[in-house]
Image (cartoon, helix red, strand yellow):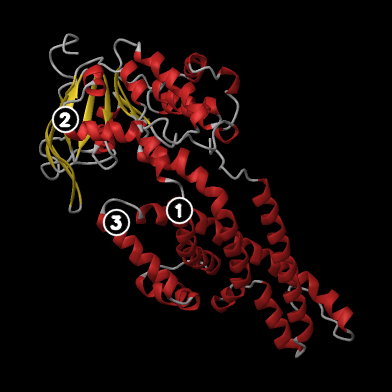
């Protein structure tokens, strides 16, 4: 029994039906973690990309170092560090927040490279025209460069979203009870792993298929020349 | 040309510009009076486009002094000797506009939005006022009916006319044309030149034009300067330079371009 639900392991069908409510509770946690992590990655990735392009060497080098560090260390290590080591320095965060933050940080490092590629692909003539019209650097990024970069970065961003969704089970190691962690617990208690794990696998498959289809539509809907942000 | 005013609006004194080990402008001195229309001609790599790009603050330079209406392009005490803050450069840019060889319209914006963007964002103009003025400018370049089109829907000549309207919307005192017709199909050159010709009648507007259209240069400019190897070899009234050049290099260049 878990969360007040009894499990009936007589057949695979009754077993599936009896564990489904719990797995769906886990699904909401999975979705929340992925959404929060991706939101952090989208915003912070852009910040990293812009800082890395700063004309002040100290800023661009520091940012490059941080991005490389985040990319080149395992998510699992980062999670353990944030959850089990930081409290030693007086920083205690709830498990879910820690998980979302770790996902967001690591994926921000990936998305910053996507942003950087998208921004660099915008023709330098656009920068020159913006300068000739006396737009500030910030206005040039916001109104000219980033709107043109958006259609180019959507496909790669979509890949990272799908990858991140599939990576959420790793949060179970810091006690976030998402879908995979719950399935594992059910298996530990009933000694029947096949059904819960298959169910979770199928739900992940469904999730990523929906995401891919949505992204494909978004990609088609976006004008290739870019979208004015305001 | 000198009857227009006494003090020059633009003054290069001994400006040296290097790209790495390549010296593009070598102790370059040059001045332009207010309202003057000057055409820069010469072989590619002779530094004429660089003069425009330096004036537009798109390129820094290493030595010498450049002023626009008395304002130096370098700010004393900022960084090295030949530097200026972004704030200072923006003050200079307020007076200068540029039309590029490759048009450089913003592809994600309509024609109208391309024109009103900077007046609204930079000059703080009200949208209604900016749009009214943009329509006027579009009428001037003969494209008022295209205001809701995107650049990709226009021909090269039309795009360049929009780019001219966009530059004029910022009310520049100096307008720079960097080979404005070089990227165009021959049959589209005329429509762009006729717009530039109209602008040349504006008494107060100072124009610097880099072009290979010699007949046009003769028609619109007060002065023609022949560039070679980062210096002006010969300059003077268009009839003199294009009709009876004294310098050997000028003669060679003109005969090569006319043949």
Subunit ID for the residue under disc 3 = A
**Residue at the spot of label 3:** A59
Residue at mark 2: chain: B
* Nearest-to-viewer mark from 1 and 2: 2
Judging by the rendered image, the residue that carries numbered circle 1 is: A46
Residue B6 falls in which quadrant of the image? top left
Label 1 crowd bin: few (<14), some (14–19), many (20+), radius 10 Å: many
Disc 2 versus disc 3: distance between alpha carbons? 52 Å
Residue B11 in sight in this render = no
> Which of the two discs, 3 and 1, labels the residue nearer the N terminus?
1
Residue B144 picture location, percent across and down: 56, 18
Asked if badges 2 and 3 are on one and the same chain, I answer no
- Check contact, mark 3 vs mark 1: CB within 8 A: no
Query: As displayed, is residue B36 above or below residue A203?
Result: above
Q: Which residue is mark 2?
A: B247
**Is label 2 or label 3 in front?**
2
């Amino acid at each position: 029994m878990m969360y007040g639900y009894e499990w009936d392991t007589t057949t695979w069908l009754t077993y599936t039906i009896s564990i489904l409510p719990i797995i769906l509770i886990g699904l909401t946690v999975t979705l929340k973690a992925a959404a929060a992590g991706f939101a952090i990655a989208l915003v912070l990735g852009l910040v990293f990309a812009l800082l890395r392009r700063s004309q002040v060497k100290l800023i661009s080098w520091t940012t490059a170092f941080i991005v490389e560090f985040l990319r080149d260390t395992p998510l699992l290590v980062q999670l353990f560090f944030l959850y089990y080591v930081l409290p030693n320095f007086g920083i205690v965060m709830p498990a879910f927040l820690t998980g979302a933050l770790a996902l967001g940080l690591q994926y921000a490092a990936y998305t910053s490279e996507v942003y950087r590629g998208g921004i660099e692909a915008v023709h330098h003539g656009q920068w020159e025209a913006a300068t000739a019209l006396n737009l500030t650097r910030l206005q040039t990024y916001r109104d000219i460069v980033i709107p043109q970069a958006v259609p180019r970065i959507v496909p790669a961003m979509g890949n990272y979203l799908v990858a991140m969704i599939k990576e959420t089970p790793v949060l179970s190691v810091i006690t976030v009870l998402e879908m995979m962690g719950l399935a594992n617990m059910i298996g530990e208690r009933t000694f029947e792993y096949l059904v819960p794990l298959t169910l979770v696998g199928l739900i992940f498959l469904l999730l990523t298929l929906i995401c891919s289809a949505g992204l494909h539509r978004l990609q088609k809907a976006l004008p290739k020349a870019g979208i004015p942000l305001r | 040309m000198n009857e227009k005013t006494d003090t020059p609006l633009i003054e290069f004194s001994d400006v040296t510009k290097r790209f790495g080990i390549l010296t593009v402008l070598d102790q370059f001195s040059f001045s332009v009076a207010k309202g003057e229309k000057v055409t820069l001609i010469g072989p590619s790599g002779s530094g004429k486009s660089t003069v425009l790009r330096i004036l537009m603050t798109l390129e820094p330079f290493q030595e010498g002094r450049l002023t626009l209406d008395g304002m130096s392009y370098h700010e004393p005490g900022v960084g090295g000797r030949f530097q200026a803050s972004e704030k200072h450069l923006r003050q200079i840019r307020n007076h200068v506009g540029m039309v590029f060889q490759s048009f450089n319209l913003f592809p994600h914006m309509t024609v109208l939005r391309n024109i009103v963007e900077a007046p609204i964002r930079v000059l703080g103009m009200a949208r209604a006022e900016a749009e009214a003025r943009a329509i006027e400018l579009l009428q001037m370049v003969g494209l008022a009916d295209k205001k809701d089109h995107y650049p990709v829907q226009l021909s090269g000549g039309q795009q360049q006319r929009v780019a001219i309207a966009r530059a004029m919307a910022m009310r520049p005192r100096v307008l720079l044309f960097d080979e404005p017709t070089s990227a165009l199909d021959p049959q589209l050159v005329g429509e762009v030149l006729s717009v530039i010709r109209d602008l040349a009648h504006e008494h107060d507007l100072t124009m610097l034009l880099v072009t290979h259209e010699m007949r046009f240069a003769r028609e619109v400019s007060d002065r023609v300067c022949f560039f070679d190897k980062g210096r002006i070899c010969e300059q003077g009234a268009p009839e003199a330079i294009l009709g009876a050049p004294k310098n050997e290099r000028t003669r060679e260049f003109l005969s090569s371009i006319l043949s």
